[in-house]
Amino acid sequence: MASEATDAEVSAEANVQAVTRTVIGILGYTRWPHESEELRLCAVGTTEYGAGLLQSSGLVVAGRRLSVRQVDPAQLKASECDGLYVGDMGEQQWRKLMQQESGRPLLTISERSALCRIGAMFCLSRQGEGPGFEVNLDSIARSGLRISPKILQLARSKAAP
């Protein structure tokens, strides 16, 4: 039995690392209109894979130092973030946040695929043995961000409603 728990822990850690690499890859292929030396990613809500991102704070991504912090959704001021990594967040709370941040270049990545239907740019999903992601091209087009076609080709497009 102990072996099973160890295998499960190893598998969970491998998933966290794979998701972390995927998110950092998305960050690395994204350009903001005005880039500072620091790339600020806020993890919002209870996340399944966010621990790896929090440990990645301090890495250099596309020439910028990555700063990752966990933020309570009620305390979130997205203007303090260049990107949001969203875990468990209700759709109403998500809609309110997106309305509040409308017109601002804010990268949004969600662990919940449902949020891609209502404005998230990237939504993580399982594809075969590892993580993949869906992309909402409409949200990206309206964001003011430039996302490399290389990363978009890896995604499965999901049209906005």
Image (tube, rainbow, N blue to C red):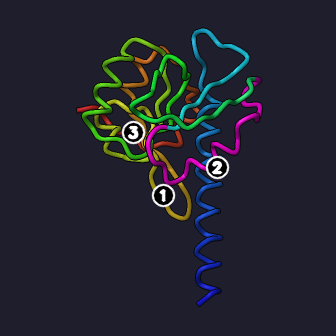
- Residue at 49% over, 16% down: 79
Q: CA distance from mark 3 to mark 2?
A: 26 Å
Rendered location of residue 132, percent (x, y): 51, 50
Within-10-Å neighbours for mark 3: few <14, some 14–19, many 20+: some
Q: Which mark is residue 127?
A: 1
- Residue at 74% over, 26% down: 65
Rendered location of residue 100, percent (x, y): 34, 17
Task: Using the image as rendered, state which of residue 107 and residue 160 is in the foreground.
Answer: 107
Query: Which quarter of the figure has residue 82?
Result: top right
Task: Name the residue carrying label 2.
Answer: 52
- Residue at 58% over, 16% down: 32
Q: CA distance from mark 1 to mark 2?
A: 19 Å
Amino acid bearing label 1: Gln
Q: Is residue 20 placed above or below 2 in the rendered structure?
A: above
Is 154 covered by the magenta stretch?
no
Q: Which residues are magenta?
A: 44-63
Rendered location of residue 110, percent (x, y): 44, 41
| Left or right of 115 in this view: 11 | right
Q: In the rendered image, which quarter contains the C terminus?
A: top left
Amino acid bearing label 3: Ser
> Disc 1 or 2, which lies upstream in sequence?
2
Q: Is residue 52 placed above or below 137 in the rendered structure?
A: below
Query: Which quarter of the figure has residue 1?
Result: bottom right
Amino acid bearing label 2: Gly
Q: Which mark is residue 157?
A: 3
Within-10-Å neighbours for mark 1: few <14, some 14–19, many 20+: few
